[in-house]
Image (cartoon, rainbow, N blue to C red):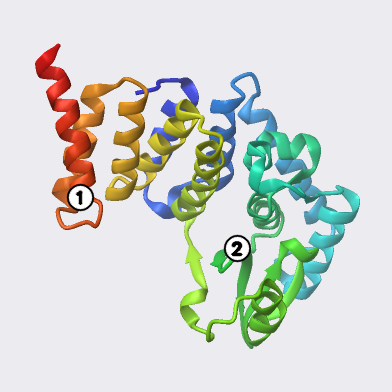
Amino acid sequence: MFASHAREQFLELARRDDPEIDVLRGALLIAQEEYPQFWVEDAEEQVEAMAEKLAHLVDAASGLHNIVYAANHLFFEQLGFKGHRSAQDQPDAFLMNRVLEEHRGSVLLLSILYQQIVRRGTGIDLETVDFPGHVLLASEGGSGALYLDIADGGRLLLADELEAEILRPQGIRRPWSDDFLRHLGPRGILARLLTELKLIYARRRDVLRTLKVVERIVLLRPESAEERRDRGILYSLSGHRMAAIADLEDYLTMRPEAADAEQVRRRLEKLLRRGLSS
């Protein structure tokens, strides 16, 4: 519905197979739709310069602990990146251009940036892990997985330390499950980033911005019935009646027995009646 150069570039990226998706570029394109005046290429060069600084300190043969030590020193001490205290209420904390300008942001975006600097500077791929109430970076080593907590200055943790060090301080008392460690690929990382923006804009009752975010989630996750439903509702609220009808019909086809199916049917019938009376 909303066409722009950034959206066209994001669509091209979303059509790629998961391993071919450039997470950094995706995050920058998400930001460019909000700040169309900034240049993605300039930001990419800025990140490459950070990666080059890391490459002068270590390489892939240095070992994970040495790489993490050097990356932490560069990222947190030399470059001064830090978490945003009110990230969950601030869209800028999830927009890469603003994080690069202010050197502060959400843990999710700082993790993405840290991951990209390490990969480009050393060739080491750190995985993003969606953990209850948290985001971690992970690396599989010869002695098992190691986890980096960017919220705690890049602290390294073993798997059996996660419950005591992260879950309990948050007041999460559920029995440990390996399902807590949900590894995200590039598509999942960008969808998670957009979902955080969706929640912020929805809390602000900003229909237009929420819609623009959900449109991009659907580009990444076209199989998601729930995102199509949400897009349809937002289309109806913003006056895009035919687009709303198409999405709500798709949702009911995909989830005919959903708990909210009857509510969605009533909304759809109202939209259809509006067309007959016009």
Q: Kindly state the secondary structure of the residue where label 1 is placed.
A: helix
Do we see residue 62 in this rendering?
Answer: yes
Judge left or right: residue 51 versus residue 172: right
Question: How many angstroms separate mark 2 from mark 1 (CA)?
Answer: 42 Å
86, 215: nearer the viewer: 86
* Number of marks in picture: 2
Judge left or right: residue 243 versus residue 183: left
Residue 119, placed above or below residue 194: below
Rendered location of residue 27, percent (x, y): 57, 41
Report which residue position mark 1 lands on: 261
Residue 115, placed above or below residue 177: above
Rendered location of residue 116, percent (x, y): 65, 52
| Location of residue 40 by image quarter | top right
Q: Residue furthest right?
A: 78
228, 258: nearer the viewer: 258
Residue 181, placed above or below residue 269: below
Judge left or right: residue 36 versus residue 87: left
Residue under the image location 29 percent in, 42 percent down = 229
Q: Kindly state the secondary structure of the residue where label 2 is placed.
A: loop
Mark 2: which amino acid?
Answer: Asp
Rendered location of residue 97, percent (x, y): 68, 34
In which quadrant is the N terminus drawn? Answer: top left
Mark 1: which amino acid?
Answer: Ala
| Number of residues whose C-alpha sits closer than 10 Å to that of mark 2, classed few (under 14), some (14–19) or many (20 or more) | some
Report which residue position mark 2 lands on: 125
In which quadrant is the C terminus drawn? Answer: top left
Tag of residue 194: none
| Number of residues whose C-alpha sits closer than 10 Å to that of mark 1, classed few (under 14), some (14–19) or many (20 or more) | some
Residue under the image location 81 percent in, 54 percent down = 75
